[in-house]
Every structure is written in C-alpha cells, then in structure tokens.
Image: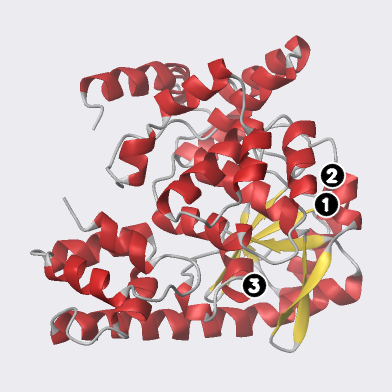
C-alpha cells in the first residue's frame, strides 16, 4: 500500500484553502517514504508532490523533502533543455506551414500547469496531418534527425511509410525524442471531424517561437482516450484531464459533439468521471450526464476498469492499448469498419510487428507474436479474475 489519498490531494487542480491540516495528517501516516517516492515517480507526480508539501512545514522529514526538491529541479532542467532543443524544429515547422500539433505532456506542461517542471514527459508527442507527413520527414532530414532504431540520419529523399496507427515513429537528435501520430484522437481508424480540428488549431508560445496546438476540446477528448488506452495506470494522466477540464471558456457542447460524432462517449465520459471522482468539482456534472453511455457500455467500463480500484491507484494488469477503439467500434455499429479494424489490430504488417517486438521480420518466432496478440485479451481477463485487486 502507498499513500494514494496524499497523492490525489497533492495533484488537485488549483488551490483549495484549508488543505494543510489534511496534508499534515496524510503525510504523517506514511511509514515507507522510500516506497512512496518510488511509486510517485511511476505515477508521474513527484514534482506535484513537492509543489504541495513544500508549502506545509513539518509535513515530511527534511530528507524526503530534499529528495523531492532535487527531483523537481532535475525535471525543471530537463524540460528547459528539451524546449530549447525543440525550438529549432518548431520554428522550422512554423516557417514551412506544415501541420504538426504539439500534444500531451509537451503541450500540457506549458498550457495547464503553473510551472513546466510540474508535468514530467520523456518524449515530445506531435500529431501530424497525414497529407503533410512527407514534408515533415523532409524537414527532419534537413535538421539531422535520426529515426529511432536506425543507424543513420533520415534520407532526404526517402518517402518512408505512411503515417497511421501502426506507424508512430520516434525521431531523435541529441536529447530530443519526437514521436509522431496520425489521428487527432489516437484511435485505430481515421476520425470523422479531422478537418474541423485542424481548421480550428491555435498557437502556443514555446520560448522564442510558437507551436501549433489542436483545440482544447479535441485535446481533452484525446487525453481521455489515451488514459484509457493505458488503463489509467498513471495518476498524472487523470490530473491532466482534471486540469484541462477546468479551463475557463472550454466549449463543453463541442466536447460532447466530438464524443458523439466520433463514437467515443464511453472513453471520454469515463475519463471525466474518474477525474471528478478523484477531485470533486473539477469536471462539471452537466457534460458528464450528457456523455454517459448506455447501461451495457457503462457496465462494461466499470467491469474493465473498476472505479474503486482505479481511484485507489491499485496496480492491475493493463488491458490492450486498442480497447478504446474497440469501444468506439461498438458504438459505430459498422460491421465493415469493425472487421477491417480488428483485422489490422490482430494482424498488423510483419515489418511493424517485427519493429514493435524486436523479432526479425523473417523469423518464424514472429508467428508466436501474432498468437500472443490474439490471446492477450483472454489472458488479461483471466488474470484479472484471479487477482482483481
């Protein structure tokens, strides 16, 4: 066990008066600070833990606060370095007019947190308009980026594979890792309102230049889908949802339209519901009621990701990454799309599966990886039944 209530308290959006007494009580109940700090690191919330505990004298031993302070400063230094290196790439994008939007941690650290050190992120995620991917690859080549796994810079004339859900490549240059995605909602098939997202894109200041960002309403839906893709196994992802949901002027009608039109009501509702459960008042009740799926899907969400264990931050085997896409297919009732998507999920191209698993594309062992993909949902369900946590 670890201090889940303390972690949740330290991640709450905004400042709440009268919280110092509760912080003192919860922090004083911690017996294993080494284990707690390790878990806070895995949850991605160590800087937020420091941000709160530094304001409550005597809440934690001095050595613990110093460890948190050093972790905060290391993250600050790393984020500062990443944004400095990223500036050249973003300026090149801006000048070229190519559509590549900063998303997830790299955006949120600047956009919804009061200090860039509070939102750790390792790589920088960008969503690229598929029509602009070839141009982005040429730009990367000109800047000397190397595709992760390759031994040489990107060839200037190489078209490369199409950017889709099976190909979300990493490119690196020095300390900078860029990961590129094709779809603004992270699903395994194209979105219906993609042109509307891009036409409504805005700009975010990043040092001396600007990054393109998709509308906050799109970003919020994407965060909900992404958190479910990873079975909500990091508290920082739910904290992101709560903070963005509290943004003044957020168009909740648009959020609901996106969720309905793209058939992702279940993932969006459940992400918002879990954030509201952890931090009451962070998400308006009206939109959650509008997004609530039918009884069958609601029961399925509670079965797959039990609210009590998720809110208590209990470890559990994650479901496969594609579960939100399966839920969206359920809502779409399109048998042709379902057949194509499920076929692509379980039988992706050999080269992609080889790169993802580290098995050579011509090795017979690759067939075992296909079998693992087919069996993983059933094995995960069986293990969760044995150990539901």
**Which comes sooner in the sequence, label 2 or label 1?**
1
Q: Give the residue at mark 3.
A: 111
The location of residue 216, given as percent across then percent down, is 72, 59
Q: Give the residue at mark 2.
A: 194
Q: Are marks 2 and 3 in contact (CB under 8 Å)?
A: no
Please give the name of the residue rendered at 49% of the width and 35% of the height, measured from the top-left corner.
360
Q: Are marks 2 and 1 in contact (CB under 8 Å)?
A: yes
Q: Visible in this render: residue 348?
A: no
Distance (Cα) linking label 2 and label 3: 22 Å
The location of residue 232, given as percent across then percent down, is 44, 44
Q: Secondary structure at mark 2?
A: helix
Q: Give the residue at mark 1.
A: 129
- Looking at the image, which is closer to me, 337 or 51? 51
Left or right, 374 with respect to 127, comes to left
Tell me the quadrant of the picture where the C terminus can be found: top left
Distance (Cα) linking label 1 and label 3: 22 Å
Q: Secondary structure at mark 3?
A: helix
């Amino acid at each position: 066990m670890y201090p889940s209530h303390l972690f949740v308290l330290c991640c709450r959006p905004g400042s709440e008066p009268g919280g110092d007494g509760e912080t003192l009580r919860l922090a004083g109940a911690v017996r294993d600070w080494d284990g707690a700090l390790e878990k806070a690191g895995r949850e991605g919330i160590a800087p937020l833990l420091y941000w709160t505990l530094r304001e409550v004298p005597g809440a934690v031993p001095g050595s613990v606060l110093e460890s948190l302070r050093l972790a905060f400063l290391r993250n600050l230094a790393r984020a500062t370095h990443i944004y400095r290196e990223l500036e050249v790439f973003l300026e090149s994008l801006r000048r070229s007019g190519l559509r590549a939007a900063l998303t997830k941690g790299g955006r949120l650290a600047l956009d919804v947190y009061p200090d860039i050190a509070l939102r750790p992120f390792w790589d920088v995620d960008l969503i690229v308009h598929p029509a602009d991917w070839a141009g982005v690859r040429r730009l990367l080549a000109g800047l000397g980026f190397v595709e992760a796994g390759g031994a040489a810079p990107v060839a200037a004339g190489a078209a490369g594979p199409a950017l889709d859900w099976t190909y979300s490549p990493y490119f690196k240059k020095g300390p900078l890792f860029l990961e590129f995605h094709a779809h603004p909602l992270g699903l395994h098939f194209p979105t219906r309102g993609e042109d509307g997202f891009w036409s409504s894109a805005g700009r975010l200041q990043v040092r001396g230049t600007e990054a393109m960002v998709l509308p906050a309403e799109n970003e919020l839906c994407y965060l909900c889908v992404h958190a479910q893709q990873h079975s909500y196994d990091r508290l920082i992802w739910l904290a992101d949802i709560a903070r963005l949901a509290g943004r003044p002027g957020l168009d909740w009608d648009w959020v609901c339209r996106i969720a309905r039109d793209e058939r992702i009501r279940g993932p969006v509702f459940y992400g918002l519901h879990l954030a509201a459960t952890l931090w009451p008042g962070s998400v308006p009740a009206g939109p959650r009621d509008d997004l609530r799926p039918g009884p069958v899907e609601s029961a399925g969400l509670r079965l797959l990701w039990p609210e009590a264990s998720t809110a208590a931050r209990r470890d559990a085997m994650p479901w496969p990454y594609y579960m939100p896409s399966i839920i969206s297919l359920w809502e779409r009732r399109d048998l042709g799309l379902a057949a194509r998507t499920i076929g692509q999920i379980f039988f992706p191209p050999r080269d992609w599966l080889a790169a993802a698993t580290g098995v050579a594309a011509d090795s017979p062992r690759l067939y075992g990886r296909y079998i693992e993909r087919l069996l993983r949902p059933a094995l995960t369900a069986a293990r969760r039944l044995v150990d539901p946590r």
